[in-house]
Image: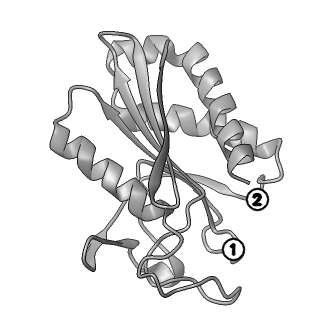
Amino acid sequence: MLSKIQLLFETANNKFLSKESEAILSGVSERNLCGSLMLYIREELNNSPYKEYYTDIEYNRKQDGKIKTIVQGEYEIIQICCDLIIHSRGENIKQDNLIAIEMKRSTHSQAEKRKDKIRLKCLTRDTFDGIWSYDGKTFPEHVCRYVLGVYYEINVEHRKIEFQYMTKGKMFKQFSISF
């Protein structure tokens, strides 16, 4: 499943970069760029087995309208709101969460970048406490089990995008591409 999700993201991202490079270079907000990327991801989802999933920007709710939280470190509960997520909004108990994306410009502080990377590692873990396991009936109290986490850093000056891919709470691929 990971390779299919990764390919879906990369196909959408390649279209996004080829058509939106001028917007990226113009300095528009990250939220605007996430909105544009979301449209390309939606297009790819529509032509995939994942067409029933939603693409949402700054989505912060889980089942019963509660605010999404993760457990970070030693059981520190943190409210979260990712830049862009692909999920079933609780409709697919088997695999609710597909992709979580955090986008940053390279000019942001290292502390801000580090927080986004930690958030993605938490979101991609299979469990938040080492105890919850998928039972096919209930969701965990805190958000986890995203198949792919993508840290997306835009460097306008060098016309590069730096990526870090995460799964199961660990980074598994780091690379950059020019646009």
Looking at the image, residue 133 sits to the left or right of residue 52; the answer is left
Percent coordinates x, y for residue 79 in the rendering: 30, 69
Which residue is rendered at x = 16% and y = 36% of the image? 109
Percent coordinates x, y for residue 56 in the rendering: 53, 53
Q: Residues within 10 Å of mark 2 (few under 14, many from 20)?
A: few
Looking at the image, residue 76 sits to the left or right of residue 162; the answer is left
Q: Quadrant of residue 158?
A: top left
Q: Earlier in the sequence, mark 1 or mark 2?
A: 2
Looking at the image, residue 94 sits to the left or right of residue 153; the answer is right
Percent coordinates x, y for residue 108 in the rendering: 20, 33
Q: Which element type, helix, strand or loop, lies under badge 2?
A: loop
Which residue is rendered at x = 32% and y = 49% of the image? 116
Residue receiving disc 2: 52
Residue receiving disc 1: 91
Which residue is rendered at x = 34% and y = 64% of the image? 80
Alpha-carbon span between mark 1 and mark 2: 9 Å
User: Relative to 94, is 151 above or below?
Assistant: above
Which residue is rendered at x = 71% and y = 45% of the image? 3
Q: Depth check: give the residue in front, 114 or 22.
A: 114
**Quadrant containing the N terminus in the rendered view:** bottom right
Q: Residues within 10 Å of mark 1 (few under 14, many from 20)?
A: few
Q: Which element type, helix, strand or loop, lies under badge 1?
A: loop
Q: Depth check: give the residue in front, 81 or 127.
A: 127
Residue 124's label in the rendered image is none
User: Relative to 50, is 19 above or below?
Assistant: above
Q: Quadrant of residue 141?
A: bottom left
Q: Depth check: give the residue in front, 135 or 57.
A: 135
Q: Amino acid at mark 1?
A: Glu
Percent coordinates x, y for residue 17 in the rendering: 55, 19
Q: Amino acid at mark 2?
A: Glu
User: Relative to 172, is 32 above or below?
Assistant: above
Q: Are marks 1 and 2 in contact (CB under 8 Å)?
A: yes
